[in-house]
Image: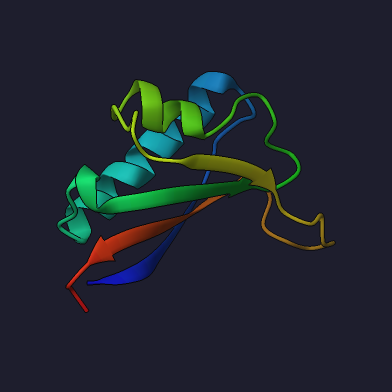
Amino acid sequence: MSVRGIKGATTVERNTAEAIIAATSELLEKMVALNALDVDEIASAFFHTSPDLNAEFPAVAARRNLGWNGVPLLCGHEIGVPGSLPMCLRVLLHVNTDKR
């Protein structure tokens, strides 16, 4: 079994807790479905947001909406590079799997 990294990203409509949680939930649900993942395969998730998203931790969506209570989660901010994509939410999933 190997640990694989799966990266995903989306933009958020506005800097509110509700918008961040909704965008995070949608992104995670799509990533799980597209990669045929079981929550038990997810070793950890690292969320990072552009500096203009700070109304809520994206990890709240994973715990509250998806029930990822046993998955280690971490949130951080990206470097505020001029010209970078605003209102951006990214996630890196570490997955224990035999899949390629």
In this view, the residue in front, 4 or 29, is 4
At horizontal 76% and vertical 43% (from top left) the residue drawn is 51
User: Number of callouts in the render?
Assistant: 0
- Would residue 39 be visible to someone looking at this image? yes
Relative horizontal placement of residue 17, taking residue 100 as reference (left or right): right
Q: Could you say where residue 66 lies in the image, as x and y percent from the top left?
A: 29, 30
Q: Could you say where residue 84 lies in the image, as x and y percent from the top left?
A: 73, 61
Relative horizontal placement of residue 15, taking residue 19 as reference (left or right): right
At horizontal 72% and vertical 53% (from top left) the residue drawn is 78
Q: State which quadrant residue 56 falls in.
A: top right
Q: State which quadrant residue 99 falls in.
A: bottom left
Q: Is residue 74 above or below residue 37?
A: above
In this view, the residue in front, 35 or 96, is 96
Relative horizontal placement of residue 12, taking residue 38 as reference (left or right): right
Relative horizontal placement of residue 99, taking residue 63 as reference (left or right): left
- Would residue 87 be visible to someone looking at this image? no
In this view, the residue in front, 39 or 34, is 39
At horizontal 42% and vertical 28% (from top left) the residue drawn is 61
Q: Could you say where residue 58 lies in the image, as x and y percent from the top left?
A: 52, 34
Q: In which quadrant will I find the C terminus?
A: bottom left
At horizontal 34% and vertical 44% (from top left) the residue drawn is 28
Q: Could you say where residue 13 lies in the image, as x and y percent from the top left?
A: 55, 35
Q: In which quadrant will I find the N terminus?
A: bottom left
Kindly give the residue lying farthest to the bottom in the view shown: 100
Q: Is residue 61 above or below residue 24?
A: above
Q: Is residue 66 above or below residue 87?
A: above
Q: State which quadrant residue 2 falls in.
A: bottom left
Display coloring: rainbow
